Image (tube, coloured by chain):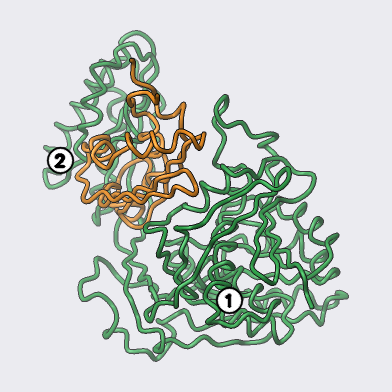
Chain colours: A orange, B green
Amino acid sequence: MTDVLLCDYAHARAGDKGNTLSVAVFAFSDEHYAWLANELTCERVAACLNHRAIGTVKRYELPNLGGLNFVVENALEGGVNASPGLDRHGKSLSYALLGLRLPPPD
Amino acid sequence: MTTTVHIGCGAGFANDRPDAALALANDLAGRDGRRFLFFELLAERTLAEAQLRRLNDAQSGYALRLFDFLEPVLETCLDTGIAIVTNGGAANPTAAATRLRQQLQGTRHASARIACVLGDDLLDSDIDLQQWLPAQLDGEVVSVNVYSGADGIVQALDQGADIVLCGRVADPSLAVGPLRHAFGWQADDWDRIAQATAVGHLLECCTQVSGGYFAHPGLKDVPDLANVGCPIASVSAEGQIVIGKAAGTGGCVTERTVKEQLLYEVHDPASYLTPDVVMDLSQAHVRQVATNQVAVEGVRGKPRPTHLKGLVGLRGKWFAEAEISYAGPGAVVRAALAHDILLQRCAKLAPQLTPWIDVIGVASLFNDAGGQWLQRHLAQAADCQDVRLRISFLNRDKALLERLLLDAESLYTNGPAGGGGVRRHIGESLGTASFLIERTAVRQQLEWF
């Protein structure tokens, strides 16, 4: 079975507070929430952002909303105050996660 | 007894669209029940910028475009009893109130009641800041503001305000104030205050809940996004919430748009801290009840925190960027050569600085300070035929940064073939640092104009 692109199964929005990134990821379909919760682990999210000196990755499960909320410390290279990067808020990083390839749902 | 309160948001940040609130005000004007319109115009650094403007001109320091937002809707709102609440007073709500008072003089709304909610500006107070501010601050302090809650807004509306101009109240408090006022909810009715906070949180970024910042053609389509409409929440006395949007506008309100905004900038969903309440979204759910109407249920509250969050605005740093483009055959290898030249030049001219370098078109938004992301992707990108090299710095030494930007521009004659379109930019980069202060140390005040 070939891996699938997360973007085709879920939607997401990123937010920032200081140097901390939060990304909420929601399954398009309720029936894919269990698959999402199973495959989109903290380890996979950390690996996706490991080019930056990230700290702890926390994951909050929201079965009522069919989503997962990730909070990644130090993911924003200083954040809107201190990063020399192009996207100082890290708003575009929702699509770094949505670009992940995961084993397909059953 | 008021049965349903309608509250709309006309702007979600300082540079939002001033014409968007017109359709919102017209929609609200036609609704029964109590109606309110709020504008959210502050971000973390906006207040420090506003404070700098106030230092240069005592009549300045409110949100730069505050009057661009107010003017299109003022008459409709005052004619039809829609109270306006905004944090666009920023660093100088009283200057904004004075100007508004002058503007209304001689019109049929000359007696409109304008209230300012003050007390968030701790530089302007007799509070001993040493006790609360971080010991180490990276820069010159230009502003100290505390995120205040809804109390002042409730008081102003209870006393008949038509327009409430605030400084740094927390964004959701702009909705909590009107809802507490309209329903007489007690400040410690935690579930109700959390539901009001959910309304404020969902609306505070304006169209981000009604189709803005959502579209992905083919996967998440949004109708008529060019005319995306402002959101309206309809709230019952029991705290039932339905999110909708202004009639005759584009965009959409769906379970998906509402879910994305509900978790926006939230860390622990069971514990979202605001000055008014600790909001618990862990059991929240959403339900489409009609086209562009989504009910939000299951929001609960816990007692508000004993401490308030404050922000110190800091100056002293500069943000510098220069860009040059390469297109056509070999664009990527030429950009990569320019990248290496810039690193060598910087090592020679300013060995203490590490530049951030992107190759836009290959790796930029997801890039990192060390350029690891860029190196991973450069080798696979040989086919790109239009890329833009970007070098940037953040530092205190403005003159040095200006020299480095000019040096980047010298890639024109000294760099690889066919480079074009150099742009340089340097600007002040205000910083912030947060702190906590005991709630009882801060006092909100009301001033009438």
Q: Residue at x 34, y 29 (%)?
A: A100
Q: Nearer the viewer, residue B390 or B264?
A: B264
Residue B312 point in image, percent of width and height: 35, 71
Query: Which marked residue is nearer to the observer: mark 2 or mark 1?
Result: 1
Q: Position of residue A7 (x, y in %)?
A: 44, 29
Quarter that holds the N terminus of chain B: bottom right
Q: Which mark is residue B93?
A: 1
Q: Amino acid at mark 2?
A: Leu
The correct choice, above or below, for B90 with respect to A44 in the image is below
Mark 2 neighbour density, 10 Å: few (under 14) some (14–19) many (20 or more): few
Task: Tell me the quarter of the picture where residue B213 sits.
Answer: top right
Chain ID of residue with mark 2: B
Q: Mark yes or no: residue B60 visible.
A: no
B262 vs A32, nearest the viewer? A32
Q: Residue furthest top?
A: B329
* Percent position of residue B22, x then y: 76, 54
